[in-house]
Amino acid sequence: MGKLMNAKEYEESLRKLNLKVYLFGKRITNVVDDPIIRPSMNAVAATYEFAHKPEYEDIMTAKSHLTGKKINRFTHIHQSVDDLVKKSKMGRLLGSLTACCFQRCVGMDAMNALSITTHAIDAKHGTDYNQRFLKFLAYVQENDLVCDGAMTDPKGDRGLPPHKQADPDMFLHVVKEQADGIVVRGSKAHQTGAVNSHEIIVMPTMSMREEDKDYAVAFALPSDTEGITYILGRQSCDTRKLEGTTFDRGNMYYGGHEALVVFDHVFVPWERVFMYKEYDFTTQLVESFGAYHRQSYACKVGVGDVLIGAAQTVAEYNGAEKASHIKDKIVEMNHLNETLFCGCIACAAEGHQEASGTYLVDVLLANVHKQNVTRFPYEIARLAQDIAGGLMVTLPSEADFKSPEIGKWIEKYYKTKEGVCTEDRMRILRLIENITMGTAAVGYLTESMHGAGSPQAQRIMIGRLIDMKQKQKAAKFLCGIDKE
Ligand SMILES: Cc1cc2nc3c(=O)[nH]c(=O)nc-3n(C[C@H](O)[C@H](O)[C@H](O)COP(=O)(O)OP(=O)(O)OC[C@H]3O[C@@H](n4cnc5c(N)ncnc54)[C@H](O)[C@@H]3O)c2cc1C
Ligand code: SF4
């Protein structure tokens, strides 16, 4: 076995990092124990914890194709269709156990995409990127590391390519070439789990042309490399975590985070560079990463499981669970959620082997799945809010509920039926609030919309990948226009 870390060891490994992290205008020196960040650390720690549970071992671990050792699936390069299917199941499992973004998929998807593209660049240009990448991968697997997958640039004026931007740093780029490596400058936006990561894997954000070759760069660095700064993003209701209360947070244990990651003249040694100006391979890297990450939105199915469970619970607490329209709405929520599951299983089941040996999902089906993800969680959330009732947004605070003076009024007036405790009703409503409009809505809703590419990105891929000629041929034959 490599070093299959447990949750405690993961936490301790983060304490050794010297990250430069800012939140609310101040530098955070103890990232691991910061009350705003801590729930997101707990969620990544769950990916370690569940790998040690016998009942989840088959889903959460894999056999390294490099060493034959047992490794965490998040560090694995998919070797079969079965691996791809298990990846989808792992996403649902962890989503259903944490009800948030557990952050570790972006790095896994970046590594799988790089395993394909480095091999392809070497085949055309005679470079040695694949060997460099495999050395990095062996290090990640051996030490069971978390990698941040950093693709998205701030992009400045969306109508202009990188080299035409008024500020050349709107896309991360090479500023200097040295005998021992390169120096880069720029930033990556919306970085999921950035300050919970040991390594950061940088990739170009979109297809590049020759004029933009300085922007066609991919590499990996330790997350505390000199010159890297993290500026945490705010989440709706985030400061509830500072109030010292418990259930007002909604999710008592877990959360996610994103950050703007700034690279201010950062040195990358050659052995960590996996693409250097080969702009002709940017499309392949972006599209394969995109397909893997669109599959990864199996996580939303797991979060949907929790939201459906919460909606059913609140219906029961309210005494409305037998109403036919409530039953129908719960069926509809399940229908939408399981349809999402069909998509992420289907793109995995239809996967294929690339020249590097890595298995890639069916790209068309992965895009169709992600297109559904941009819609269905919003409808599931709408139905959950319908079932929850208005109290979800007018509920007094936990502190008022616990007040010796006025708590009795909340207890009295927010009681529903015999056997239901008012505090439990408040707790389940706070969880629905958390997932549909609080900190977890970042992952369940807006990330479903934009993460792994905004909806239009999938529509472009669907339009390109559909075999329209075959469809027309069948139609024309069946109505007699064509005889064969
Ligand atoms: C919660 C969250 C987590 C994320 N995590 C990560 C991560 O870990 N790693 C990572 O690399 N990225 C991450 N992303 C980034 C994600 O991939 C981007 O948000 C996505 O690609 C959209 O880019 P944008 O946010 O800059 O939106 P914009 O590019 O500003 O898009 C806004 C709208 O404008 C449209 N648009 C933009 N450009 C054009 C154009 N040229 N022509 C026509 N229409 C255009 C889009 O289709 C969209 O409708 C995350 C995003 C979110 C929200
Ligand atoms: S949003 Fe989902 S796929 Fe993306 S990192 Fe979080 S858990 Fe993984």
Image (cartoon, rainbow, N blue to C red):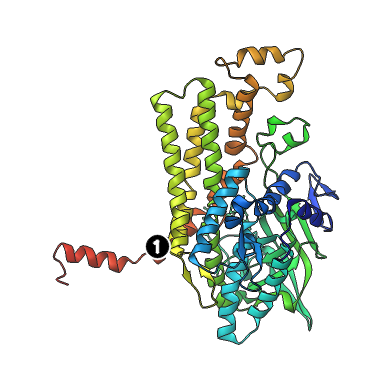
Height in image: 29 above or below 421?
below
Query: Which quarter of the rendered picture does the N terminus lie within?
Result: bottom right
Please name the residue that numbered disc 1 is placed on: 463
Viewer-nearest residue: 161 or 366: 366
Height in image: 99 above or below 108?
above
Residue furthest toward the right?
29
- Which of the 4 image quadrants contains residue 138? bottom right
Residue, x 83% and y 65% (percent of image)?
226
* Mark 1 element type: helix
Residue furthest toward the bottom?
126
Relative image position of residue 430 (x, y in whole percent): 63, 30
Viewer-nearest residue: 180 or 57: 57
Tell me the kind of residue under disc 1. Answer: Gly
Residue, x 16% and y 69% (percent of image)?
482
Residue, x 63% and y 23% (percent of image)?
395
Is residue 176 toward the left or the right of residue 434 in the image? right
Relative image position of residue 15 (x, y in whole percent): 83, 54
Relative image position of residue 424 (x, y in whole percent): 63, 25
